[in-house]
Image (cartoon, rainbow, N blue to C red):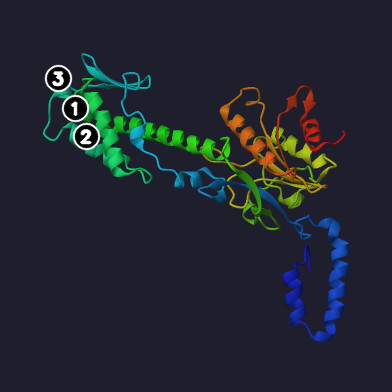
Amino acid sequence: MTGRVAPEVETAITTAIPAPERQGFAEAVRKYRVEIKDQLSPAEQGEDFVVPRLVTEIQGAFEFADTDVFMEFHDWRLADHLARLDEAAFAIRETTRSFEIDVDGNRVTYQFADEAEQLALDVDVDGWTPQNLVLWLDRQLRQPDIHQSDLLKWLTDCIGHLVGPRKLSIAALMRTKFILARKLNERIGAARAAERNKVYQRYLFAPEARVDMSFDNGFAFRDGMYADQKQHRYMGRFRFSKHFLGADAVPTFDGAEAGEEFQCAQALDSLPQVKFWIRNVARHPQSFWLPTASDKFYPDFVALLNDERFIVVEYKGALLAGTGVDDTNEKRAIGRLWESRSGGKGLFLVVEKIIDGRDMRAQMLEKVGGAQ
């Protein structure tokens, strides 16, 4: 045997060998475990830990705090969102030898091949009607979460405005229908994003929101959880001493090999208050995440402290630090909500390279309440 002897392996061997040999085998396994303990990672030694998950009350029952789940309980109508495109959003302008499509200030110019084609821009063609353009757009833009009647009403309003008050010819619209469809698809996406933000705020941050923490359905960290990440491991010279999965199983870092995120991991590894920590792999089904209005947020690191508290750390790179970008503000807000509902068990921190003269390690020490 090399490495960890899993309990199930020990049981299988015990069952297979003759009964008189079992006591000796059990003693040999016990001694072996003592001898190699320092060589094994916390996970290989049988350690595991569960990080609590945010839950929130929806229609009288607690559900996972996930914006996708919120939307399942939310009825919304596309007709409640602006369909009409003004000239700044979508315009068609004719010149002597070309016509120009202007979408949000981005102009695309098409040259006419001959005089006949130029004249055809405003020439009616059989089947080129506002109704048929609406039906064509309906086929292009159908969405699983939008009822077809809602989409048709919204598209009818949009095309009616373009050919009515805006006075764009149906022939010109038919010739530019693919660009129009792309613009309208963006509008639908913006409407959906607005609805997602609405329910996100309602179920998590509104005064009446009932948000709690669940260990029963928490994120379990255990041996082998990132076994499928063998091709994406840190291979540098530095040996981390407290990584939960071991120094040879640290998932890769973003950026350069010795970049700022790597330095943040070094600082976390050095804290005396940390029992062990793990590089939290983004998008992995076993990883810890918090909800955002648009997606899921996977913080960079999760650690268990010696006093059984958890600290979740997100590193904010120098390129973003000080920009006040909404993405980081949203991460801070949901992280603080998770911390506030943890009953003192969880800490959340956004680390920057330097804040008010304090380096990464000093920022983390201040958060966990430790001395330098």
Rendered image: mark on residue 125: none
Q: In the figure, is residue 358 to the left or right of 186? A: right
Q: Can residue 252 be seen in this view?
A: yes
Question: Distance of mark 2 from mark 3, alpha carbons?
Answer: 26 Å
Q: Nearer the viewer, mark 1 or mark 3?
A: 1
Q: Which quadrant: the C terminus?
A: top right
Q: In this view, does 220 lie above or below 34?
A: above
For the residue marked with disc 1, what is the amino acid? Ile
Pointer 1 residue: 170
Q: Which of marks 2 and 3 is nearer the N terminus?
A: 3
For the residue marked with disc 3, what is the amino acid? Glu
Pointer 2 residue: 133
- Residue 192 locus on image (x, y percent): 42, 37
SS for dot 2: helix
SS for dot 3: helix
Rendered image: mark on residue 115: 3
For the residue marked with disc 2, what is the amino acid? Leu
Q: Which of marks 1 and 3 is nearer the N terminus?
A: 3
Question: Distance of mark 1 from mark 3, alpha carbons?
Answer: 20 Å
Specify the quadrant of the image occupied by residue 337: top right
Disc 1 vs disc 3: Cβ atoms closer than 8 Å?
no
- Residue 78 locus on image (x, y percent): 35, 36
Q: Which quadrant: the N terminus?
A: bottom right
